[in-house]
Amino acid sequence: MGKTTHIPVLDELPPPPSGRTGWPWTEGPGAPPLGLPDGVSWPRISVVTCSYNQAAFLEETIRSVLLQGYPDLEYVIIDGGSTDDSVEIICRYAPWLSFWVSERDEGQSEALGKGFARSTGDILAWLNSDDIYCRGALSSVGSYYQQHPETGLLYGDSDVIDADGAVIERLKGQDAGLESLLVRNVIPQPSAFFSRHDFNRAGGINTELHFIMDYELWLRMMLQGTTLRYVPELFSRFRWYQVSKSGSYSTQFGYEYLSLVEKLFRDPKDDRLLKMRLKAFHYAFTMIMACNRRGAEDDDIMRALDLWVRHLEQYADDYDKDQKLWADSLYRIGNAYCLQGDMRRGRRYLSKSFEVGGRFDNMALPGWLVSCLGNRAYGVYERLLQAATPLARRLQS
């Protein structure tokens, strides 16, 4: 049996830094009852936090876990050998941790594997060192699992916050099956909790991945028959900022998912995969193309465009049966070429998109007309379109 985290009250923890107030600095929840309504013990929840040089946010993360007041919590921190003040922060909270270590590793995936190997809980989760749990999240999760023990993967909503903690938007989860999950990740990772049984059955964390290890795990769990449950509750706050992993490596997210899709469809073992092949590839390429608006390197964008064009040629017969998806792919390729300044090639694909999809199916015709005015005019048009009405944004999605 692993060491259960000692659950502190607010006054036991180190005082917050000057100027820090509210949750989880000067506010803490009342402890939940020692047993569930039917007298059954709370299930053990193991939370792993991996960290590397995240001293600016790590303490808030730690406090948001410890101040949950959850009776059977196991909290593990795996630090990758930080050179900032992270270890000092961890040491201040060490009396309330089940286990912690600071040593060099090969990245987040390896650290997660190490952390979960140290854990003993029936319910597992990981919270990145710049994210935070909302008050009462673990009590809600523990109660749900006790009432619905067949659940393999439970997830809720997450607020996206900036470096200062201001809410940018809300990531709302959705009920999902394998087919829908292949074309959109609707599971906010900081708000996801999964059973050890299903985690082990799926094979655990894929340590070869560095960006989509959560998404790939959800898909493997689904292929193994895991039961997913979405509850419309706010469990976490996910921090997004330019120097964060999520904010800085968007192109790599897309390429890693593209490699995953290619592997899944090389020898599909599940009939559900086959009918989603084109949409899964489409999602992978659009993930990469989204980086065009975030200052991705030109070489990355051109490489992705070349791969997408070859993909359309390889599956031309299949796309002929789904002309809407075909037209959208052609439009996005043309749009990306125009944003890169290759107006001639961009107009060619916008024209093809219009031919396939027709006047009302996409934005190819107005895009083609604006592209005739040059790259600068097209860039202004694209920015206006992105900031326009919800209808226009849906046409772009």
Image (spheres, rainbow, N blue to C red):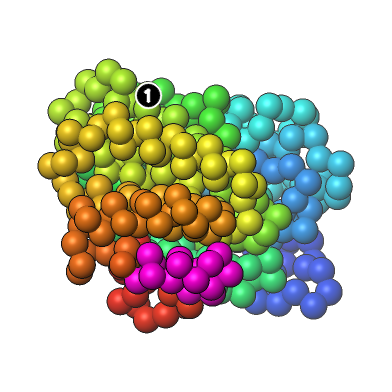
In the image, 34 versus 221, the foreground residue is 221
Q: Position of residue 372 (x, y in %)?
A: 45, 67
The residue drawn where x is 22% and y is 55% is 355
- Looking at the rendered structure, the kind of residue marked 1 is Lys
Query: Dot 1, how many residues are within 10 Å of its Cα: few (below 14), some (14-19), or many (20+)?
Result: few
Which residue position holds label 1?
Answer: 263
The residue drawn where x is 46% and y is 42% is 305
In the image, 133 versus 367, the foreground residue is 367
Where is 373 relative to 12, above or below?
Answer: below
Q: Is residue 293 something one can see in this rendering? A: yes
96 displayed left or right of 280: right
Q: Position of residue 266 (x, y in %)?
A: 31, 20
Q: Main secondary structure of the magenta part?
A: helix
Q: Secondary structure at mark 1?
A: helix
In the image, 50 versus 122, the foreground residue is 50
Task: Report the span colored magenta.
Answer: 366-382
Q: Is residue 322 magenta?
A: no
Where is 78 relative to 327, above or below?
Answer: above
Q: Quadrant of the C terminus?
A: bottom left
